[in-house]
Amino acid sequence: MKKNMIITIGRQFGSGGREIGMGLSEALGIPFYDKELIVAAAKKSGLSEAMFEHVDEKAANSLLYSLVLGAYTPSNALSGMPPVYMNETLFRIQSDVICDLANEGPCVIVGRCADYILRERDDCINLFVHAPLTHRIERVLDTCDVTKEKVEDLIAKTDKKRANFYNYYTGQKWGEAKNYHISLDSSLLGVDGWVKALAQTL
Amino acid sequence: MKKNMIITIGRQFGSGGREIGMGLSEALGIPFYDKELIVAAAKKSGLSEAMFEHVDEKAANSLLYSLVLGAYTPSNALSGMPPVYMNETLFRIQSDVICDLANEGPCVIVGRCADYILRERDDCINLFVHAPLTHRIERVLDTCDVTKEKVEDLIAKTDKKRANFYNYYTGQKWGEAKNYHISLDSSLLGVDGWVKALAQTL
């Protein structure tokens, strides 16, 4: 396979997709972008990080959601814009940031429809990382501040949010194998095992 | 990863999933079952191969389909059974054959819900193979007796049939990444490239 690729990673919550991305970034010596995209989008636009944080990986298709977003009043040209358009505008700004970063060279980008945003490029490898629910519950209990009673609900809600966001902006289906070059169950080899296997293959 | 695994392969039509399975069977020195399952099911049941061929990877959920199947009258205990039950019975016979083969040792099994039928075992690796439509059109034109005008229709209909069959018998969604340990775009590395990469990883 070609070297010097841009790697995008979609992931179920608690699957370790972010960690596999970080491992690949380290193994291949290329930059890693996850929440870093929010900082970059804020810097590019002059808007606050809080605004991007608020809409991060959320779809803009509910009136209630738009009203909530409307509580954020930016201090520039977006001011006065109906909330639903504001949301779309923030998505476009973040998409531009993703395109700019891809133009700078090989990197790992987690979430945020990067596979779709960069679909015209022929130097992307799109990954989707998932794992059985029992495995994800264990991982989330180990890494997040959540109780045993609430962990399943947190996983279901976060995955639903990610799926809605992806489906809304791409017109494709989140987690459908055909949208990604490789989809993998992280529990099969573990995070380190998959980083090694992918780094050898990529 | 554990050695000596049973490998099941779901696949889009024209993706090369069967060929990857054959390659893995050869590389790992384990038996390969695709259409061979029909012969084994016929032998086990005493019914004709034609009967199993007729229902192969087709769902049993349409009245029309059941009526068509009803035209086949077996010469044993299935005779007189309503068509829809006959179809379920043939599926159960084939499922038993798949379980028997898995009990015999490591092997590669293509299609026929084998991932779901063997879901209680912990020695299975479930793969799903897909590829972009343009790539599949080329492959099907090279290997099947079909015209350029009809190839897209053949691909769409075969995939729809496979999806209906899988969704009907498993209650899961064919081609959804989370149902398989690894889903892969065969065009990324090619059949030989994937056989090599998977054989190293498995």
Image (cartoon, coloured by chain):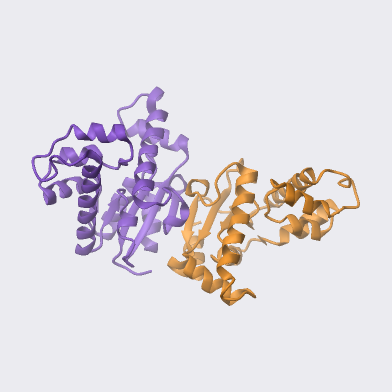
Chain colours: A purple, B orange
Could you tell whether B102 is left or right of A89 in the image?
right
Query: What residue do we see at 17% from left, 49% from top?
Result: A41
- Could you tell me residue B109's position as x and y percent? 64, 56
Q: Give the residue at x 21% y 43%.
A: A86
Position of residue B113 measured from the top left corner of the image (x, y, whole percent): 63, 50
Up/down of A66 relative to B52, above or below: above
Q: Say left or right for A105 vs B56.
A: left
A162 relative to B144, above or below: above
Could you tell me residue B130's position as x and y percent?
50, 60
Outermost residue, right direction? Answer: B75
Which of the 4 quarters of the picture holds residue A12? Answer: top left
Query: Above or below — where is B57 with respect to A138?
Result: below
Residue B193 seen = no
B24 relative position to A3: left or right: right
Observer-nearest residue: A51 or A87? A87
| Any part of residue A164 in sight | yes
Count how many numbered circles sit on residues in the image.
Answer: 0
Position of residue A52 measured from the top left corner of the image (x, y, whole percent): 20, 42
